[in-house]
């Protein structure tokens, strides 16, 4: 039995009782460390062991991590690395830093975790860069259409020291956020029940004219307009109902987001458009980071690096073995059990979409935002700079084979 499924079978009353006894963070971190079948007694033992370890000494710093809608169960579907980061940071600092994990939208959600971090309500947050772009507009820099040809290219960029100058430093200077690590997928269209009886999408033109949910990213909206996909702003928390009620034909997001958010029952086709980033990242307040002692700053960066390496391997495996985003599909996966068909478009169809909407082939609609982002970066041509780094590796590189690097070191 999968851990994620077993956790869902433990009653909310029992989870609340354990949380009352050991604290929510100890329960979540303990659950995240379990493998195989999970029972209430095994979860209680794990929570108690985690509690004893975490509270063995008084921390110098307690950091609140607002994890939007994440919990121990769905972080085994979309492997965003948040629990691994928190657990490793506590162990690495021998309890000098304690992380208070607050997920399930209890303290902040996808759209406002960034602002609550900037305001000091939480010290760290996990949410998509696209949803966070409303509060930190420089995050739009990741969302030029077809800037990244693959998930491997995304990981390569995040590991590259060039990401410091192009992404991380301007984000910190402009928005007070320290970008730590991220999961990497590319966004497609997740079509609702209006596509259930239609053949699996093979041509981009079959999507023209559909009405689709868009996130908080301004650049993603440009791409969708150019592809005739009628972007409609819908909050992430309302997307499930929008698809269920037929208010929208589809939603732009990525495969594991559909699976972790329990959207699979209302999604019929997961169309792999690959048209811009899907990056579920974790950032922290730069002010909080800068106030830390040097050895704790080093520990935060090393734990972020470990989390990035974990995510790179774990999410690639989960896409195939847990989500079912593959052809052929593995039986027992979330997509297979909910009759969600992955639609992997041929290269010529991706090329048509790229020529319709990317800044390389259609620069004018992007010019205003490109100039704005370039100005915020200190004069870098942001699109071209990231585009070039993304193509430093062969186009057929597998994501799990990208070489990890400590991006904050120039060598």
Image: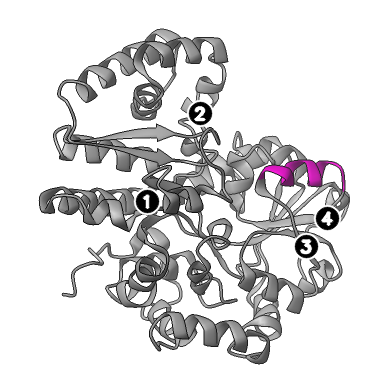
Q: Residue 4 carries which label?
A: 2
Relative image position of residue 267 (x, y in whole percent):
75, 46
Which of disc 4 and disc 1 is earlier in sequence? 4
Q: How far apart are marks 1 and 3 (CA)?
A: 29 Å
Single out the mark in the foreground, 4 or 3.
4
Q: Distance between the residues labelled 4 and 3?
A: 14 Å
Q: How far apart are marks 4 and 2 (CA)?
A: 29 Å
* Picture residue at 53% right of the left edge, 70% below the top: 140
Relative image position of residue 23 (x, y in whole percent):
37, 19
* Label 4 sits on residue: 249
Q: Distance between the residues labelled 1 and 2?
A: 18 Å
* Label 1 sits on residue: 313
Relative image position of residue 331 (x, y in whole percent):
61, 37
Relative image position of residue 246 (x, y in whole percent):
87, 47
Please say if the residues under marks 4 and 3 sit with CB atoms less than 8 Å apart: no
The residues colored magenta run: 237-246
- The quarter in which the C terminus is drawn is bottom left
Q: Is residue 241 magenta?
A: yes
Q: How far apart are marks 2 and 3 (CA)?
A: 30 Å
Q: Magenta: predominant secondary structure element?
A: helix
Residue 127 appears in the figure: no
Please say if the residues under marks 1 and 4 sit with CB atoms less than 8 Å apart: no
Pick the front one: 115 or 327: 115
Pick the front one: 186 or 399: 186
- Local packing at callout 3 (Cα closer than 10 Å; few below 14, some 14-19, many 20+) is many
* Label 3 sits on residue: 201
* Picture residue at 18% right of the left edge, 69% below the top: 409
* Picture residue at 39% right of the left edge, 40% below the top: 65
Is label 1 in a helix, a strand or a loop? helix
Task: Say which quarter of the image contains residue 210.
Answer: bottom right
Residue 92 vs 326, above or below: the answer is above
């Amino acid at each position: 039995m999968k851990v994620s499924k077993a956790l869902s079978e433990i009653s909310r009353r029992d989870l609340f009782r354990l949380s009352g006894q050991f604290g929510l963070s100890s329960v979540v971190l303990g659950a995240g460390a379990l493998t195989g079948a999970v029972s209430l007694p095994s979860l209680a033992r794990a929570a108690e062991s985690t509690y004893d370890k975490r509270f063995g000494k008084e921390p110098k710093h307690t950091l609140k991590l607002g994890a939007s809608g994440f919990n121990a169960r769905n972080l085994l579907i979309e492997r965003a690395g948040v629990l691994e980061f928190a657990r490793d940071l506590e162990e690495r600092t021998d309890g000098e830093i304690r992380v208070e994990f607050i997920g399930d939208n209890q303290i902040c959600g996808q759209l406002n975790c960034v602002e609550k971090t900037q305001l000091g309500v939480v010290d760290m947050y996990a949410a998509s860069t696209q949803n966070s772009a409303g509060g930190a507009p420089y995050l739009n820099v990741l969302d030029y259409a077809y800037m990244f040809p693959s998930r491997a290219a995304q990981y390569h960029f995040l590991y590259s020291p060039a990401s410091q100058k192009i992404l991380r430093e301007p984000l910190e200077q402009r928005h007070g956020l320290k970008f730590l690590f991220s999961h990497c997928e590319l966004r497609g269209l997740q079509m609702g029940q209006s596509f259930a009886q239609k053949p699996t999408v093979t041509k981009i033109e079959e999507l023209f004219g559909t009405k689709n949910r868009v996130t908080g990213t301004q650049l993603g909206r440009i791409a969708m307009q150019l592809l005739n996909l009628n972007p409609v702003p819908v909050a992430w928390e309302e997307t499930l109902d929008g698809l269920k009620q037929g208010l929208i034909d589809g939603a732009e997001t990525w495969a594991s987001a559909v699976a972790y958010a329990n959207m699979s029952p209302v999604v019929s086709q997961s169309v792999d458009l690959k048209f811009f980033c899907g990056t579920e990242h974790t950032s922290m307040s730069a002010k909080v980071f800068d106030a830390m002692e040097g050895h704790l700053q080093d520990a935060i960066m090393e734990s972020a690096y470990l989390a990035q390496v974990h995510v790179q391997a774990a999410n690639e495996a989960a896409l195939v073995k847990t989500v079912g985003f593959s052809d052929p599909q593995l039986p027992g996966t979330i997509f297979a059990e909910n009759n969600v068909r992955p639609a992997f478009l041929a290269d010529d169809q991706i090329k048509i979409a790229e020529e319709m909407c990317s800044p390389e082939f259609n620069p004018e609609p992007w010019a205003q935002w490109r100039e704005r982002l370039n100005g915020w970066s200190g004069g870098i041509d942001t699109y071209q700079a990231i585009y070039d780094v993304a193509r430093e590796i062969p186009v057929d590189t597998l994501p799990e084979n990208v070489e990890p690097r400590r991006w904050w070191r120039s060598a």
